[in-house]
Image (tube, grey):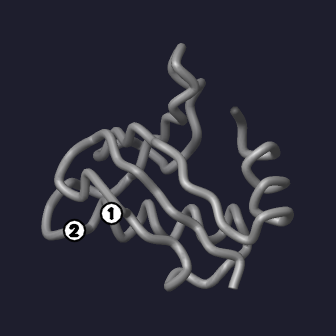
Amino acid sequence: MDIADLQAKLNEKGKISFPVKVSPGADKTEWQEPLADGTLRLKVKAAPERGQANAELVAFLAGIFRVNKKLVEITAGGGARLKRIKVKKS
């Protein structure tokens, strides 16, 4: 699964949920190749301190999916690298 597939599913169904593996403390925030099981991978520039990496993840995904940050939620794995994300269209 890639971002285009997720965007199409979001437009069709109005909400999506997907796993993402996050690597904090990178040089810049960017996508990486997905894992073999389809889990998306993302590097974030922010450090994993005081929720900074999670906040950057949410902001980045909101920009990718063109939704308000309030519509992007980390539903599982808030303190872990492997997270479950839910995005609503409205």
Query: Which class describes the residues within 10 Å of circle 1: few (<14), some (14-19), or many (20+)?
Result: many
Q: In which quarter of the image is the N terminus?
A: top right
Seen at 23% across and 55% down, the residue is 47
Evaluate if marks 2 and 1 touch, with contact meaning CB atoms under 8 Å apart. Answer: yes
Q: What number is the disc on residue 54?
A: 1
Question: Where in the figure is residue 77, as x and y percent of width and height?
Answer: 25, 51
Residue 81 lies left or right of residue 19; in this view the side is left
In the image, what residue type sits under mark 1?
A: Asn
Residue underneath mark 2: 51
Residue 75 lies, with reference to residue 6, above or below; the image says below
Q: Nearer the viewer, residue 85 or 67?
A: 85
Residue 14 lies, with reference to residue 53, above or below; the image says below
Residue at the extreme front of the image, as rendered: 13
Seen at 27% across and 41% down, the residue is 81
Question: Where in the figure is residue 82, as x and y percent of width and height?
Answer: 32, 40
Residue 87 sits in quarter: bottom right
Q: What element carries label 1?
A: helix
Q: Is mark 2 on a helix, strand or loop?
A: loop
Seen at 53% across and 47% down, the residue is 18
In the image, what residue type sits under mark 2?
A: Gly
Q: Which of 79 and 49 is in front in this view?
A: 79
Residue 3 sits in quarter: top right
Residue 7 lies left or right of residue 59; in this view the side is right
Residue 43 lies left or right of residue 75; in this view the side is right
Question: Where in the figure is residue 30, as x and y percent of width and height?
Answer: 56, 44
Query: Which class describes the residues within 10 Å of circle 2: few (<14), some (14-19), or many (20+)?
Result: few
